[in-house]
Amino acid sequence: MAKFGYLFLSRNLVTRDEDRAWMKEFGCTDIIEEEGIQERFRPEWRRMLAHLKDGDEIVVSKLSNALRGIREFGVFLGLCKDYGVRIVSIHDEIDSKGELFPDTSVGAVLDVIGRISHEATLIRRSEARMLQRRKDLKPKTEKEGMRMKKEKTVVSMYNAGHSIDDIWKVSGYRSRTSVFRVLNRNGVKLNRGRHQGPLGKRTKKD
């Protein structure tokens, strides 16, 4: 008998660390984590279901976090019934074995089931927006890609504590001013030496 934990790492799941710790304390032998970008196909979830055996246990954060709708929920229930799999949903406070959450009523369970499709849709839309943002951020040309890579290097080096002079030499920019422009454009707070906070507008000297 195995205990599986499943975490779908959606942006809505703000309790991932707590849930992971809960699963470990419960004795999950394998905690599977699914990236939000895989919201549609969920290969890790499918792989886990394919390896279920009689008497296994599955722990999820919420049913709507693991399942994409009421239809998938019905198929999942049928599979768990065939294999005698115990289902534990942490935040729904549901334990199909009836041990962990004795105060959860039948009405509360029905309410959770009724919310699955709606909550799953919200997650799906949220992850779709995030995926679109990632696509929009991809460089459209090779030149733009090289520029983005160079700026990423500048930001990373500054955050790692390198001096402006060192960053300037590595970056290949013509002047140190270009380095400051990159940091300012990327919202980096200057926190060393006489350069503190965002760069202001340059004023002409008389």
Image (tube, rainbow, N blue to C red):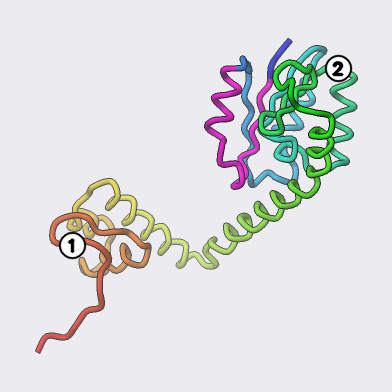
Query: Which residue is pictured at 59% across the width and 47% down the height?
Result: 11
Q: Is residue 11 magenta?
A: yes
Examine the image and state in which quarter residue 96 appears: top right
- Looking at the image, residue 155 sits to the left or right of residue 107; the answer is left
Amino acid type, label 1: His
Amino acid type, label 2: Tyr
**Which of the two labelled residues, at mark 1 and mark 2, occupies the earlier sequence position?**
2
Query: Which residue is pictured at 68% across the width and 21% down the height?
Result: 4
Quick one: 193 or 27, which is closer to the camera?
27
Q: How many marks?
A: 2
Around disc 2, counting alpha carbons within 10 Å, would you say few (fewer than 14), some (14 to 19), or many (20 or more)? few
Above or below, comparing residue 204 to residue 129 in the picture: below
Q: Are marks 1 and 2 in contact (CB under 8 Å)?
A: no
Around disc 1, counting alpha carbons within 10 Å, would you say few (fewer than 14), some (14 to 19), or many (20 or more)? few
- Which quadrant: the C terminus? bottom left
Examine the image and state in which quarter residue 100 appears: top right
Location of mark 2 (residue): 83
The magenta segment: 4-25
Q: Point out which mark residue 84 bears.
A: none
The image position of residue 157, as x and y in percent, is 29, 50
SS under mark 2:
helix
- Looking at the image, residue 179 sits to the left or right of residue 48; the answer is left
Location of mark 1 (residue): 195
Quick one: 53 or 106, which is closer to the camera?
106
- Which quadrant: the N terminus? top right
What is the CA distance from the residue labelled 1 to the residue labelled 2? 64 Å
